Amino acid sequence: MKTVLAICASPPSLQRAFRLVERRATIIFCATPGEIAQIRTLDDLGVYDLIVISPIYWRVPTTSRTLAAHLRARFTGPIVAIGDTPQWRKPMKDAGCDPVIRYSDETALLIRELLFPSTPT
């Protein structure tokens, strides 16, 4: 089973993004300042197959961008940034997230393809 770390201000905001993989992947949500601070202390993020991050700046002192850069330094797999604000997406790309996308119906398809390449629809 694959494991996804989802960092977000509100877990329900990302639920739809995981609808195509939720039965075949364990999704670990981090939404509180304490949970996010705990993730920052981990040196080895190799237990995760994918990291998904959405804007958190209004919930915690750490910005999404600095958190993404911190994660990128410790994680070699894909880090997907999902956000609707263009001014947020560019810094996330610069911090090492790839892909950086808007939230849409295709988001779930992208996550499924990253976790399970070439899975038929």
Image (spheres, grey):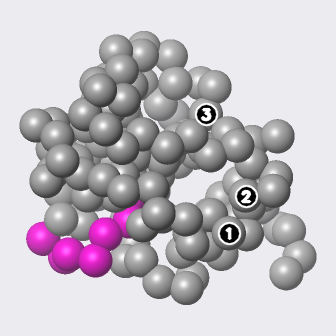
Task: Tell which tag, 1 or 3, sits nearer the viewer.
Answer: 1
Q: Amino acid at mark 3?
A: Tyr
Q: Residue at x 57, y 72 (%)?
A: 16
| On-image quarter of the N terminus | top right
From the top left corner, tell me how far across and down residue 12 is, in percent.
47, 63
Residue 59 left/right relative to 17: left
Residue at position x 34%, y 15% in the image: 41
Q: Which residue is mark 1?
A: 19
Q: What residue sits 89% from the left and 76% below the top?
A: 120
Mark-to-mark CA distance, 1 and 3: 18 Å
For the residues labelled 1 and 3, say whether their Cβ atoms are less than 8 Å apart.
no
Residue placed under numbered mark 2 in the picture:
22
In the rendered view, does 46 fall on the left or right side of 37? Answer: right
Is 110 in front, or is 94? Answer: 110
Helix, strand or loop for disc 2: loop
Crowd class of label 1 (few under 14; some 14 to 19; many from 20; radius 10 Å): some
Q: Amino acid at mark 2?
A: Glu
Mark 3, other Cα within 10 Å: few <14 / some 14–19 / many ≥20 = some
User: Residue 8 at x, y = what percent?
Assistant: 36, 52
- Identify which residue, 40 or 28, lies in the foreground: 28
Give the residue number, with chain letter if any, for mark 3.
Answer: 48
The image shows residue 64 at horizontal and vertical percentages of 22, 47
Residue 103 position by quadrant: bottom left
Q: Start and end of the magenta stretch?
A: 81-87
| Frontmost residue, 77 versus 24 | 24
Question: In the rendered structure, are the residues bearing label 2 and label 1 in contact, judged by CB atoms less than 8 Å apart?
Answer: yes
In the depicted structure, whether residue 93 falls above or below residue 95:
below
